[in-house]
Amino acid sequence: RKANTRLPPEVNRVVYVRNLPFNITSEEMYDIFGKYGAIRQIQIGVNKDTRRTTFVVYEDIYDAKNAVDHLSGFNVANRYLIVLYYQQSRMTKKVDNKKEDDLTKMQEKYGVSTKDK
């Protein structure tokens, strides 16, 4: 690690992982991601929408960068991991779009219009 190394703006300590096997355990997650540095927290998705995804929070930003560099495309139980840096703006857009779609469906179902007549 170089003290004066400049990292891209999207790099942060939180790593978002997709395409996980259904039966992966927390211990296996710590084994896989712990090789690249100290982990503060791992959150595995359990809902229908969040299954096969997880968030891994590292203590150090350089450990997170090392994990993303080495684990993207890593094969776990015949599934290739998609490892990205967590970006709040992208996640909220997905949630907002889903909420907007649900609201539109409800408005159509009950005949409610938001446009001024």
Image: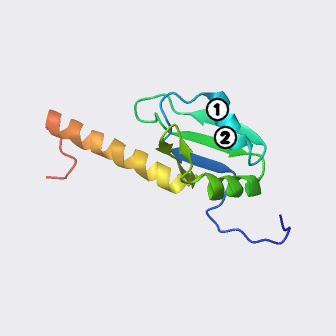
Image position of 115 (left or right of 82): left
Q: Residue 28 shows which numbered tag?
A: 1
Residue 61 position, x and y percent, is: 74, 55
**Which element is circle 1 on?**
helix
11 lies above or below 25? below
| Location of the N terminus (image quadrant) | bottom right
Q: Residues within 10 Å of mark 1 (few under 14, many from 20)?
A: few
Q: Amino acid at mark 2?
A: Ile
Q: Amino acid at mark 1?
A: Glu
**Which element is circle 2 on?**
helix
Q: Residue 58 shows which numbered tag?
A: none
When asked about the image quadrant of residue 11, the answer is: bottom right
Q: Residues within 10 Å of mark 2 (few under 14, many from 20)?
A: some
Q: What residue is shown with label 2?
A: 32
- Does the residue at mark 2 contact the one at mark 1 (Cβ under 8 Å)? yes
Residue 96 position, x and y percent, is: 40, 47
91 lies above or below 107? below
